[in-house]
Amino acid sequence: AGSAAGSELRSSVHGVGGGLELERMDAGAFCDAFFHVKPTPEAGIPVCCLRTPGGCCSGKTTALVAQLVRGRNVLYRALYKNRSQADHAEDLLMRDRDLESAVAHADGEGLILRVWLTIQPCHFSSGDDGRSCSLALLRWHERTLAPHGVPLQIIAAYPYRAHWDAVHMTEDDLVQLGRRAWGG
């Protein structure tokens, strides 16, 4: 591993079974981790799966790739995957001491932490009314990145149900989803 201040890439993998190695993924594993889009009929989005028409992956994996970059130079790259419903990929990112070290030892000028997610960070969803990875990431940014002048850029491949608006939802929809996130 090279110095974060130098031009050598430091890389890490976190998640189930020691992580997810991109070089060894078949199409199904790649789809499950990154590509798969669940059908969203209310938005006119059909299922998108690399295994169709012969089969379909579970599409349940949340994967996150983080890169600390300066211009075109990648100083640190890590891949994270949900370990469980209680231990999200975002949690692994926020606990990554190697990433924190890379940020702390690099001159902050021109640095940015880019985070690609298969789905947007949860916000009082994912089966836990009291959990918000969105808010946790904002707090982590303020505590860990901002003191070094490092902005956080989050890119979500699939903004799952982000188009929902309580004003346009039926009473049954609100009951099924729970009013926790809708303020009622």
Image: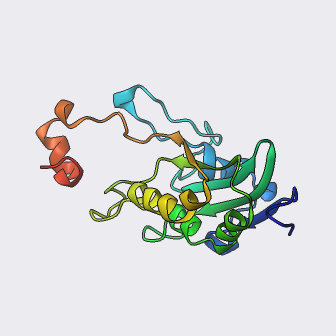
Q: In this rendering, would 109 be left or right of 122?
A: right
* Residue 115 percent across, percent down from the top left: 60, 50
Most extreme residue toward the top is: 44
Describe residue 103's horizontal placement relative to residue 84 as left or right.
right
Number of numbered discs: 0
Q: Position of residue 134 (x, y in %)?
A: 41, 54
- Near-viewer residue (123 or 103): 103
Depth check: 35 or 87 in front? 87
Position of residue 114 in the picture relative to residue 162 (left or right): right
Image quadrant assignment for residue 76: bottom right
Along the viewing direction, whichever of 62 and 39 lies nearer the viewer: 62
Quadrant holding the N terminus: bottom right
In the image, 149: left or right of 142? right
The figure's colour scheme reads: rainbow
Which of the two residues, 76 or 108, is positioned nearer the viewer here?
Answer: 108
* Residue at the (37%, 38%) spot, across then down: 162
Query: What is the quadrant of residue 126 in the picture?
Result: bottom left
Relative to residue 116, is residue 12 depicted above or below?
below
Q: Residue at x 81, y 61 (%)?
A: 5
Q: Position of residue 146 (x, y in %)?
A: 54, 57
Q: Residue at x 72, y 65 (%)?
A: 102
**In the depicted structure, whether residue 48 falls above or below residue 120:** above
